[in-house]
Amino acid sequence: MNVSSPRDMSIYISIIASVIAGVTMVVTIGFTGYYALAVIAAILFIFIVVYIVSYYLLSSFIFEKINPIYKTIHNLNISDNELKRELEEKDLISEVNKEVLHWATSKSREIDKLKEMERYRKEFLGNVSHELKTPIFNIQGYVLTLLDGGLDDPSINKQYLEKAEKSIDRMISIVEDLEAISRLEAGEMRLDMDRFNIVTLVDEVFDVHEIRAKSKGITLCFDKEYDKPVWVYADKKRIYQVLANLVVNSINYGKQNGKTVVSFSDMHERILVEVNDDGVGIDKKDIPRIFERFYRVDKSRSREQGGTGLGLAIVKHVIEAHKQTINVRSSVNEGTSFVFTLAKALSDKGKKA
């Protein structure tokens, strides 16, 4: 018998009490004639009395125990009478048991999430400290050298001032990238949505980074000749930043005399943009963390190339701010492919498809 509410429990107790009382009376006074009616009347009376008393006691006891639990779980601000009426309509014990299990599970998840956030916070602060400490110490070293007499030596004063300037520029880049990510995460960065030809935008990125690519013998190109414009609806400035970060990343991690190839695919309402390289690739274990702030697959190479470690994090946030997706495929020593989508623009008024 399911006894998951005060009513069920009271009925169960009343039946047991009535059966015991009935058996006792039958054994004691018999069950014939007038005595049979008396026994039946007594059993009914005992059943009713026991039911009323047990129901009242059980309801009061269970409600007293469950009331604070239920209110805590649901953060309720209602009177006891209102709560009692609500609970009386439910299968009380099983309902509260279910609610407690659900509450415990959700709190466990919250705790795990908080632990993960704390781990991430500590890691992030450590990374920021490390990234800023390097250029600060460099600047300090250059300034001390100049103060110790280097300022009067024409052969080194300009050289050290230029090095100090590079370290300052690196600090500025880190701070600007951190500010950009913070604004994107907080939803404070307004997107200036417009219609533009993404083929032309990629050409602009190629022109800016051509010298850097040629220094490693890397060719920047499209997968084919695009005779017609590929219109997208997005923030042109932010998408330029995305493309520039991905192209620079492909150059930094590309092989000597390699290739960076950009391609576009029409996906009905979206344009699929793919940036491929045949560089060193990314190990499978590193791929899930590739878009994290300051995460570097090859730390020494990234710093040599002057990266802040925030480029791919910015890329992901910009694409997500456009309500689009970005993914990465990679194989060690074979290359990497970053693929993201943008809304396709069809009309001359800049509205997306």
Image: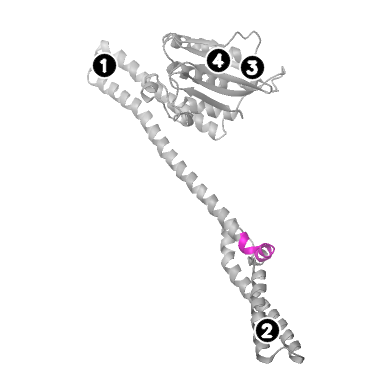
Tell me the distance, in whole angstroms, between the alpha carbons under discs 3 and 4.
17 Å
Q: Main secondary structure of the magenta part?
A: helix
Q: Position of residue 65 (x, y in %)?
A: 56, 67
Percent coordinates x, y for residue 344 in the rendering: 66, 21
Which amino acid does the dot numbered 4 rest on? Val
Q: Which residue is mark 4?
A: 262
Which quadrant, please, contains the N terminus? Answer: bottom right
- What residue type is disc 1 on? Leu
Write down the quadrant of residue 97 in the picture. Answer: bottom right
**Residue marked by disc 2:** 22
Magenta range is: 83-95
Pick the residue in front: 251 or 204.
Answer: 251
> Which residue is found at the position 51% from the left and 47% from the top?
110
Query: x, y (%) of residue 284?
Result: 46, 28
| Pointer 3 residue | 196
Eye-nearest disc, 1 or 2: 2
Sequence order check: which comes first, mark 4 or mark 1? 1
Q: Is label 4 in contact with label 1 (beta carbons under 8 Å)? A: no
**Does the CB distance between marks 3 and 4 fall below 8 Å?**
no
- Residue 296 is labelled as none
- In the visual, does 216 lie left or right of 156? right
Helix, strand or loop under label 3: strand
Residue 228 location (% of width, % of height): 66, 10
**Image quarter hosting the C terminus:** top right
Under mark 2, the amino acid is Gly
Q: Nearer the viewer, mark 4 or mark 2?
A: 2
Q: Residue at x 53, y 28 (%)?
A: 316
Which circle, 3 or 1, is nearer the viewer? Answer: 3
Of the pair 8 and 143, the residue shown nearer to us? 8
How busy is the neighbourhood of tag 2: few (under 14 within 10 Å), some, or many (20 plus)? many
The CA span between labels 4 and 1 is 48 Å
